[in-house]
Amino acid sequence: MITHFNARWIGIVALCVLALTLFPVSATFASPEPGEFTGTITSLPASGLIGDWIVGGKTVHVSNLTYIEQKYGAPAIGKTVEVKGAPQADGSINALKIEVKPDGTTSSSSQVKFYGTIVSLPAAGLIGDWVVSGQMSTTQSINVTVHVSATTKIEQTDGKAEVGAFVKVEGIKQADGSVKAHEIEVKSGKPGTGTKVELYGKIESLPASGLIGDWKVNGQTIHVANTTKVDQKKGQAQVGAFVKVEGLAQADGSVNAHEIEVRASTGNPPSSTKYIKFYGVIQTLPASGVIGDWTINGLTVHVDAATKIEAKYGAPAVGGRVEVKGVLQADGSVNALKLEVKPASATSGTFGKAGAIAQTR
């Protein structure tokens, strides 16, 4: 059951107003992570739910505007909840949302949430073990075994749960490093067969002889035929070169390339400033705030105080969609000039497979 204090629309409007107040359009606004944590309820108000809670040793202020999600039961002492809100100077939290977690969920140390790409699924259906390539506590993607049961909530509004889809996984980390999932949300599905896609990245491998055959770019298989136009005016097509690929997505997630443009060769700085624009899904953010290196569609994007960040649709967050405008560097990274957060509705119709592909507009 989901409880809203006052009418549903009042809570939604209030959250939007608070979000705009907390995260205004700015180049250097605070990251929301400090106000998000998972913990066990040890104290509740004497009467009802409005008032101060103690969760994981922190004081959480709950008002009639706080959205409390109770699909796994009512808040009670001993229950584990996820809290999202605004940190206060005294260390307390003004709660915007509190979500009751399923029984068996423990504190933040074992409760995990990560984003990644589905690598494999059970032979039949979705119940069983998935493999998701993503990041939990490391800076490098790893393959994580995700245990999915009949009680796991699978949200497929923004795409189908299939190999190549980009997903958010929430669950309990097991002793062997696997995750027992209680919720999986598809953030973006892979492009359908015949979808026109655009891919930026480094060449990882080439055919044994010549350029005709299968290439690997950012882990993606690119089929190059004798009809594919390979533009090498700005550099040689070689392992390590940064390229732009245009083509059609195939059912297995590969791309039939109709044009490949070399943007920069290995170790050679661009002969002139190269501006690029692409669309993608945020895969990692700096540990604190927004200044630092982001990973978007497998590319390293450098963000500094001069980067303009347009966040009218919300603060940048892992799994969110963005448009990037910047300057291509010799190592294949991008110095961002502008980052624009896109609305959540800009999913399968605008973006392709996270970590590799961004559909053209």
Image (cartoon, rainbow, N blue to C red):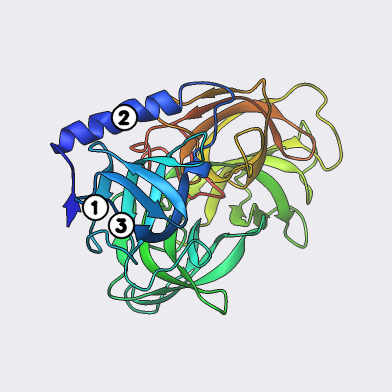
What amino acid is found at the position of numbered circle 1 in the picture?
A: Ala
Which residue does the numbered mark 1 point to in the structure image?
46
Separation of marks 3 and 2 at Cα, in angstroms: 23 Å
Counting other residues with Cα less than 10 Å from the Cα at mark 3, is it few (<14), some (14-19), or many (20 or more)?
some
Residue 240's label in the rendered image is none
163 or 4: nearer the viewer: 4
Callout 2: SS: helix
Contact check, label 2 and label 1, Cβ < 8 Å: no
Count of numbered marks? 3
Q: Position of residue 331 (x, y in %)?
A: 78, 40
55 or 349: nearer the viewer: 55
Separation of marks 2 and 1 at Cα, in angstroms: 29 Å
Separation of marks 3 and 1 at Cα, in angstroms: 36 Å
Counting other residues with Cα less than 10 Å from the Cα at mark 1, is it few (<14), some (14-19), or many (20 or more)?
few
Which residue does the numbered mark 2 point to in the structure image?
16
What amino acid is found at the position of numbered circle 3 in the picture?
A: Glu
N-term-proximal mark, 3 vs 2: 2
As displayed, is residue 77 above or below residue 115? below
Q: Position of residue 23 (x, y in %)?
A: 46, 27
Which residue does the numbered mark 3 point to in the structure image?
155
Between disc 3 and disc 2, the foreground one is: 2
Contact check, label 3 and label 1, Cβ < 8 Å: no
Q: Is residue 121 left or right of residue 30?
A: left
Q: Is residue 223 visible?
A: yes
What amino acid is found at the position of numbered circle 2 in the picture?
A: Cys
N-term-proximal mark, 3 vs 1: 1
